[in-house]
Amino acid sequence: HVRAVAPYYGVPVILNSDHCSKKLLPWFDAMLDANEAYFKQYGEPLYSSHMLDLSEEPDEENIATCVEYFKRMASMKIWLEMEIGVTGGEEDGVNNEDVDPEKLYTSPEQVYTVYEALSKVSPMFSIAAAFGNVHGVYKPGNVSLQPARLGKHQEYTKEKIGGENDKPIYLVMHGGSGSSDDEIALAVKNGVIKMNVDTDTQWAYWDGFRQFESSKREYLQSQIGNPDGADKPNKKYYDPRVWVRKAEESMVKRCGVSMEKLFSVDTYPAKIPESGSLPMWNFKATGPVQSAVSKITSGIAAITGAK
């Protein structure tokens, strides 16, 4: 679906899978199988990037596992994001609300160890280093976010490897929701190229629906009958396509706010590819996917009269 729709918007679309813990590695293996099958036919992978979150494991195991998977990904030019250190709060069933505060801050030595191992495979990787990040939004003063630490990581790695680049590491900011403009700006200045904003966008989606329901409440109490008349229908108000769209529009606006905070507005001019120039329809799937694709193709042929 993403591949079919994205070209019509004329902007780069990155398809990323997020937070794969150790227990989900079999699922990760299957995604790489699909990437390899697609890459074999088209010379590009299905996904742009994958994130391995083995931060709950010992550093040695975390890094070694990432290296092995990265070797497989690098041949297809898939970006790897890995996490070292712990993001506080709770997200997707992983609860770190009571974690040792010291684990919320990754050291420069840890970050360099990751860089040293992964850079031998490919430069296409980023590191989600903890600097007091917390999933969710909390009362100001309850979270000590320290983006200045990211600059220390860059300085340490530059000193180790030499060179002129002041920011040799691509960094990721997890738990961006609720962060101040100054904290985000400093994180970007210190090399953050990606920020996760889940909680704020969840609220924006809900808030769009909430505002619609509040403004149209008298039209949402029955199928027929509203302030305009006892026999007036309300379908155009309770139709899910209407209120879901209001939620989506609200979230779109919030994403625009993040783009402004991250200085990414107007970074890439819109460019719509020529029709038919992107590989979408002829992927040679196997197994259950092949069966589903065959049924879809047959259905399209029956409707269009194509052979």
Image (cartoon, helix red, strand yellow):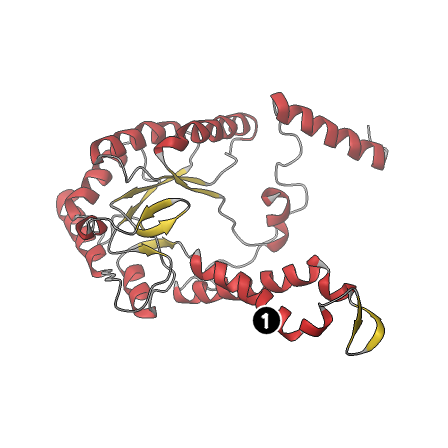
SS class, disc 1: helix
Q: Is residue 177 above or below residue 120?
A: below
Q: Quadrant of the N terminus?
A: top right
Residue 101 or residue 147, whichever sits in front:
101
Q: Position of residue 234 (x, y in %)?
A: 78, 67
Q: Position of residue 273 (x, y in %)?
A: 61, 48
Picture quarter containing residue 186?
A: bottom left
Residue at point 37%, 62% (across, down): 137
- Locate residue 52 relative to residue 100 in the image: left or right: right
Q: Quadrant of the C terminus?
A: top right
Q: For the view shown, which residue lies furthest in the top direction?
A: 287
Q: Position of residue 151 (x, y in %)?
A: 20, 57
Residue at point 34%, 69% (across, down): 181
Residue 162 shows in the view: no
- Locate residue 93 relative to residue 120 in the image: left or right: right
Residue 63 or residue 241, whichever sits in front:
241
Q: Which residue is mark 1?
A: 211
Residue at point 61%, 52% (across, down): 272
Q: Residues within 10 Å of mark 1 (few under 14, many from 20)?
A: some
Q: Amino acid at mark 1?
A: Gln
Q: Position of residue 266 (x, y in %)?
A: 48, 63
